[in-house]
Amino acid sequence: MAISNRYDFVLLFDVKDGNPNGDPDAGNLPRIDAETGRGLVTDVCLKRKVRNFVGLVKSEQPPYEIYVKEKAVLNKTHERAYVAIGAEDLLKGEDKKRKGGDKVDEARQWMCSNFFDVRTFGAVMSTGVNCGQVRGPVQLTFARSIDPIVSSEHSITRMAVTTEKEAENQSGDNRTMGRKFTVPYGLYMAHGFVSANLADQTGFNEDDLSLLWQALSSMFEHDRSAARGLMATRGLYVFKHDSKLGNASAHDLFDRVDVKKIAQGPARQYSDYQVQINEQNMPDGVKLQRVLG
């Protein structure tokens, strides 16, 4: 049974000596708001980590398979849906996209039932083999750092080369120079929304919701790399409404979470900040759940 409550949540995470989300169009520099200097992490990056965590915990078995994953061929997955609902005849011929009719909705429901990320975040599955479109009940914003960040550039050396020609050009010195970019420290805040009305359409249920909170709390623990440095979820504050439509505006609830730097000079650790949540005069029908922090 789908969830029956609306949720709005605030996610706090930090990075130390790492690159939380490189921009491939800018030489993999950490993403930044050019006007304010504040760091950015895209919603796509955060959802990727949630997908990876769920796939790891649930071994990518139905109903927790992952639709958007590394090296996936999406149209092949769409074909699985048509085979599963007994409509494989519609896969014959070249014009697969326009075929399906009433079977498109059945295929869409099959995708929602079997793939966690489809019923959670939604998906456009009308390319090629048509499984329709799903608007996900869970949506995330970009994460933005509390204070401006500084991107540090580091030159690195590898004591080896890739080809023999490179070795000949270096007379056997065999060194390869490279660069990496890190953020000395940054505390980021993202906001999220869970719609009970859209959950009705995808079948997003209480078990899925609990798994989402678990993923957001622990996703960095299984995403380690030298490039990302030290990353951790520091806070997950959930506002639960007692109705599907909600009892207060999301922005009013988000304004109750206040993060301020208390250290003198540049921040270099989480304790350099203070997180305060105003729980006074909470709107009727709204409860604060401190999942983490």
Image (cartoon, grey):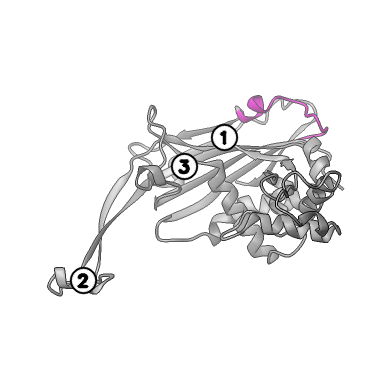
Q: Which residue corresponds to the image point at 38% horizontal and 31% vertical from the top-left?
A: 34
Question: Residue 146 versus residue 93: which sits nearer the camera?
Answer: 93
Residue 66 visible to the viewer: no
Could you say where residue 289 lies in the image, as x and y percent from the top left?
Answer: 70, 41
Q: CA distance from mark 3 to mark 1?
A: 15 Å
**Circle 2 residues within 10 Å: few <14, some 14–19, many ≥20:** few
How many numbered dots are placed on residues in this image?
A: 3
Disc 1 + disc 2, Cβ < 8 Å: no
Horizontal side of residue 29 vs 112, given as left or right: left
Q: Which residue corresponds to the image point at 77% horizontal and 50% vertical from the top-left?
A: 112
Disc 1 designates what residue? Answer: 276
Could you say where residue 118 lies in the image, as x and y percent from the top left?
Answer: 71, 49
Q: Which residue corresponds to the image point at 47% horizontal and 33% vertical from the top-left?
A: 260
Could you say where residue 54 lies in the image, as x and y percent from the top left?
Answer: 66, 58
SS state under label 2: helix
Identify the mark nearer the N-term, 3 or 1. 3
Magenta-colored span = 241-254
Discs 3/1, front:
3
Could you say where residue 137 lies in the image, as x and y percent from the top left?
Answer: 73, 40
**Circle 1 residues within 10 Å: few <14, some 14–19, many ≥20:** few
The three-letter code of the residue at mark 3 reads: Leu
The label on residue 187 is: 3
The label on residue 165 is: 2
Rendering quarter of residue 56: bottom right
**Circle 3 residues within 10 Å: few <14, some 14–19, many ≥20:** many
SS state under label 1: strand
Discs 1/2, front:
2
Question: Residue 170 versus residue 141: which sits nearer the camera?
Answer: 170
Q: Looking at this rendering, what residue extends furthest in the front direction?
A: 93
